Image (spheres, coloured by chain):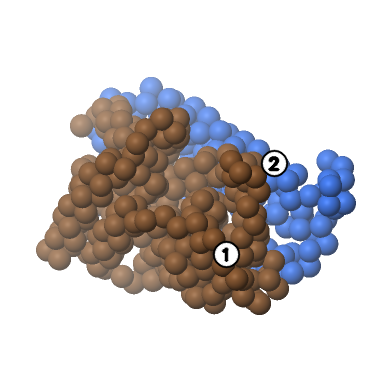
Amino acid sequence: MSILAFTLILLLGAYLAGLAGSLTGLGGGVVIIPLLTLGFNIDIRYAIGSALVASIATSSGSASAYVKEGITNMRLGMFLEIATTIGAVVGATIAIYMPTNVIAIIFGMVLIFSAVMTIRKKHDHNNVIGSVAARKLKLNGSYPTADGQVHYQLTNVFGGFSMMSLAGVLSGLLGIGSGALKVLAMDAAMRVPFKVSTTTSNFMIGVTAAASAVVYLQRGYIDPGIAFPVIIGVLGGATTGAKLLPRMNVKVLRIIFSVAISIVALNMMYNGFNNRF
Amino acid sequence: MFKKDMSGKILGDRDLQKIIGTLLRFGVITASVIALLGGIIYLFVHGMEVRPAYNTFHGEPSAYTSLGGIIDKVLSIDARGIMQLGTVVLIMTPILRVVCSLFSFAVERDRLYVVITLVVLSVILFSMFSGIKI
């Protein structure tokens, strides 16, 4: 295959991955890894490098809109980024010693978990009594809704912080944003309203991914010939997705996509068990 | 920039949100334009060559794995170098966002969050300069 044909096909594939990631809420990076490894027969280390960069692109692109709307809780994000960045550096270090087949198997498991998370019920957690730690750390906040500004409090800061460390490790190890786990930490543990969890998670993905991307760049995982079409394609797809999202009922789409992505995940795991990576 | 909002703070959270939102957008657009420019040159010069052997991992040559090396390549109008510079700008975007938050927390005299932000920044800088390689 010529470089031109490869780049154009990859550009189209990355566009569709970005579109699917945006419509389902999975994020652009996570779909890129199976696309590159299973679809294009690219080594998983190159795939991890470019997926990481793609998740920085989509996270920063969409975060810019959410931050301006005032939904993102920037103090909460900054505080939890201590956990995710330390986790990411640990994850990127573990990745040196971990066989690529094991990485592929873990990736498959995280992908299935993420797919299940997209069809889960969404909670707004009204009337939560905030913990002392949340108040002292100034983590309680408010966000705009159609009925005006809604104030919220949150709880179990330690539990959320611990889950965020794990989210960081997986992000650094697998080259993904691990948005699903970040949302779970804020939603299930800390009882943050759903809209705030998703936008704050998205806000944190860029910094978390950058903490391990600087390691992967120096380690030679990021190839410009792969990263360029991936970045442009995923960003384009995510932009289209953001425009389509308010006009679409994504419920059915999410279920179909979750099933499809789970099959892909099982394929990754099967190949991992058979030492194909 | 230092106008007072209703809570009487010099630089309110709303201002911070606007500045950070603009910074993120600007970073992503700049990175994409650089990567696209490099990509177009790359396709013109190398488009008809055979796809590199990405199925086995070789690691990038050292010229593409350090900022100095990448800048040298950009100055010699090397397409892959320009594309890689786009990636570097993209990686720098969220890091600059943290630096920007640091200043705004300092202006707000929020000592707790100045410390928290410094911790996050130190972790990233440690990761950047520790030079963990294979």
Task: Tell me what residue is drawn at x 36 percent, y 67 percent.
Answer: A95
Relative horizontal placement of residue A145, taking residue A50 as reference (left or right): right
Q: Quadrant of the C terminus of chain A?
A: bottom left
Chain A as rendered: colour: brown
* The disc label shown at residue B18, or none: 2
Where residue B42 sits in the image (x, y, percent)? 40, 29
Residue indicated by mark 1: A127
A70 or A31: nearer the viewer: A70
* Residue under the point 34% across and 28% down: B46
Q: Say which residue appears at 34% left-offset and 39% top-offset.
A: A250
Number of other residues with Cα within 10 Å of mark 2, as a class: few under 14, some 14 to 19, many 20 or more? some
Q: Which chain is blue?
A: B
Q: Which amino acid is tagged 1?
A: Asn
Alpha carbon of mark 2 to alpha carbon of mark 1: how far? 29 Å
Which quarter of the rendered picture does the N terminus of chain A lie within? top left
**Residue B25 figure quarter:** top right
- Which secondary structure lies at badge 1? loop
Q: Nearer the viewer, mark 2 or mark 1?
A: 1
> Can you say whether A255 is above or below A93 in the image?
above
Mark 2 belongs to which subunit? B
